[in-house]
Amino acid sequence: MFEIDNLTNEEVKELDTVRDLLNFVIERESLQNCMFNIIIVDNEYIHKLNKEYRGIDRPTDVISFALEDNKDFVELDFRVLGDIYISLDKAKEQAELYGHSFLREICFLTIHGLLHLLGYDHMEKEDEIVMFGKQDELLNAFGITK
């Protein structure tokens, strides 16, 4: 189960496809009894989060807060994975920069954030290969290509 909250003043029609993508990934990856949130924000909002929680004084495209990484996490009958914040501004900028659609970018950032909630990382080259391969696999299987 997941929620998508758009905290910006802009309508984002692509969020219907993001919902479909997430349902596809949940089924494909057999993610049962789990919940998470996708929160769409602007650059100002994500900049504050990035500075406060990561010590990086600039906006970023996506930040995941994985609750299962918390050592004080309480075991429940279902998994509370955490929250994924996506900058709408950055998604638009990066879609133009990389020469693909906004839909592809917002879907990529969503899957990237979700994989972080599931424990994937890209700090080491080997981990990056695994995580980015999984991103491509899921996006391609759903029909979101470059």
Image (cartoon, rainbow, N blue to C red):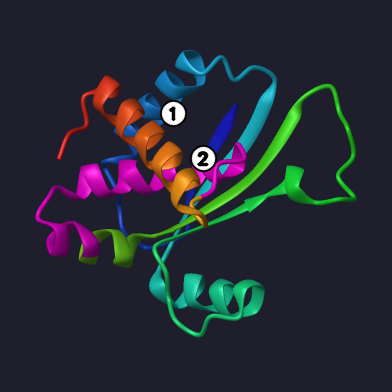
Q: Earlier in the sequence, mark 2 or mark 1?
A: 1
Amino acid type, mark 1: Leu
Identify residue for label 2.
Answer: 114
Q: Main secondary structure of the magenta part?
A: helix
Residue at point 41% right, 62% down?
A: 8
Q: Does residue 27 appear anywhere in the picture? A: yes
Mark 2 surroundings: few (<14), some (14-19) or many (≥20) residues within 10 A? many
Amino acid type, mark 2: Leu
Residue at point 50% right, 85% down?
A: 57
Q: Position of residue 56 (x, y in %)?
A: 53, 80
Camera-side residue of 11 and 38: 38
In terms of image quadrants, where is residue 129?
top left
Q: Looking at the rendering, in which quadrant would you find the C terminus?
A: top left
Kindly report which numbered mark, 2 or 1, lies closer to the viewer in this rendering.
Answer: 2
Q: Does residue 111 appear anywhere in the picture? A: no
User: Mark 2–mark 1 contact, CB under 8 Å?
Assistant: yes
Would you say 55 lies left or right of 46 here? right
Would you say 49 lies left or right of 4 here? right
In terms of image quadrants, where is residue 42?
bottom left
Specify the segment rendered in magenta. 94-121
Point out which mark residue 22 bears: 1
